[in-house]
Amino acid sequence: MNPFAYSRPDSIDSAIDELVTEPAAKFIGGGTNLIDLMKENIEKPSRLIDINRLPLTDIVELPDGGLRLGALATNADTAYNPLVKERYPLLSQTILAGASPQLRNMATNGGNLFQRTRCYYFYDTSMPCNKRKPGSGCGALNGYNRIHAILGTSDSNPLTTCIATHPSDMCVALAALEAVVRVEGPNGERTVAMADFHRLPGNEPQYDNTLQPGEIVTAIDLPANGFAQHYNYLKLRDRASYAFALVSVAAGLELEGNTVTNARIALGGVAHKPWRKTEAEELLVGKEAVAANFRPVAEKLLEGAKGYGHNTFKIDLAKRAIVRALTEAVTMQKATPQ
Ligand SMILES: Cc1cc2nc3c(=O)[nH]c(=O)nc-3n(C[C@H](O)[C@H](O)[C@H](O)COP(=O)(O)OP(=O)(O)OC[C@H]3O[C@@H](n4cnc5c(N)ncnc54)[C@H](O)[C@@H]3O)c2cc1C
Ligand code: SF4
């Protein structure tokens, strides 16, 4: 691990000032991802700006019926918050499907948005990786790519190729719920729709998201509609717990009788960002909520999917997972999180 300075600002403005003055510094929340990356010499911040004294831990109701999740509220406090459990059980269920109780007690909502890919070659500094070292190549393309992306990949130019996935569970539910990320920086405050927060690799796989230099995430806003009646997070992985998703599906439905009036579906484990396609969701509106109508939705969501050998199984797996997740969302076979 490289030497680094440490500071602990007590206001958002001073945290931003510190980052603007020292761009090679990094904020630290729970440290559950950043410290691992520092130990592996992948992240080498000149300073850790510990943001845990900032007043960003609250979860509060919004006048429009939504909920604001502080960036420093832990994943555990968020998942077990009574309002989240009651009005956004999809989010609660999704957070509890990730990591372990100990990690969720430390991990913050802000930090969860920024967790980096679990691509083996990103972590192995002896291997080429365009995300870790732009222009060096991609070890995964012709390597062991079982956990890698099948949608939205960048593979035409060896110097910019990246087929990594975003590993977060929580972000998949946030995408389905159309959450909004609140950001502050040297130019003031702004909001970013969840759909625009993470990015596809394109020609610059080194960038995971659209945050600008000097900016900090202060909160995540949930819209009023939490799809609390018919929801499901289906996470398929190699172990039943403490493992990242190979494929995951966050689904929310609104029904009149058995007819779908509104649908949201986001996929995890398949792309560089949570994967959503509104055209696929619209296919369901006005249709009966039955498996026969879910299959075309799955086909639409996976349109253009491409496997790289070891991960090709994910294409069919994702289609089946979508049908199952929606079927379970209708019948509510999963227990509401306790
Ligand atoms: C063994 C293990 C298993 C895991 N399994 C899962 C899993 O199954 N599913 C899952 O979703 N996750 C999993 N995780 C990842 C875990 O959820 C993340 O590490 C955690 O959410 C990161 O939050 P943190 O507060 O600890 O972030 P930190 O490590 O403190 O920070 C991560 C990054 O975010 C930046 N950052 C933090 N807060 C802010 C902010 N407010 N504004 C701007 N930048 C900020 C930091 O600068 C840093 O770059 C696992 C982690 C481990 C170690
Ligand atoms: S898939 Fe992306 S993160 Fe993984 S080795 Fe290739 S460039 Fe690096």
Image (cartoon, helix red, strand yellow):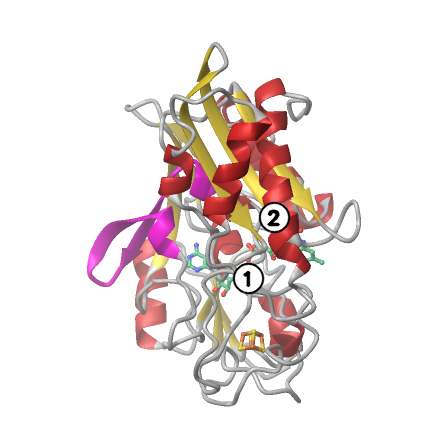
Nearer the observer, 119 or 84: 119
Which of the four quarters of the rendered structure image does ligand 1 lie in?
Answer: bottom right
Which residue matches tag 1?
A: 150
- Indicate which disc, 1 or 2, sits on the residue closer to the N terminus: 1
Q: Secondary structure at mark 2?
A: helix
- The secondary structure type at the circle numbered 1 is loop
- 42 or 311, which lies in front? 311
Q: Is residue 75 visible?
A: no
Q: Is residue 40 left or right of residue 201?
A: right
Write down the quadrant of residue 335 in the picture.
top right
Identify the residue shown where x is 60% and y is 76%: 122
Residue 222 on image: x %, y %: 39, 34
Residue 62 relative to residue 244: left or right: left
Quadrant containing the N terminus is: bottom right
Check disc 1: other Cα within 10 Å, few if <14, some if 14-19, many if 20+.
many
Disc 1 to disc 2, how far (Cα)? 10 Å
In this picture, which residue range is highlighted in magenta? 173-197
- The residue labelled by disc 2 is 318
- Is mark 1 in CB contact (under 8 Å) with mark 2? yes
Q: Determine whether 33 is above or below 175 in the image.
A: below
Check residue 216 for magenta coloring.
no
The quadrant where residue 77 appears: top right
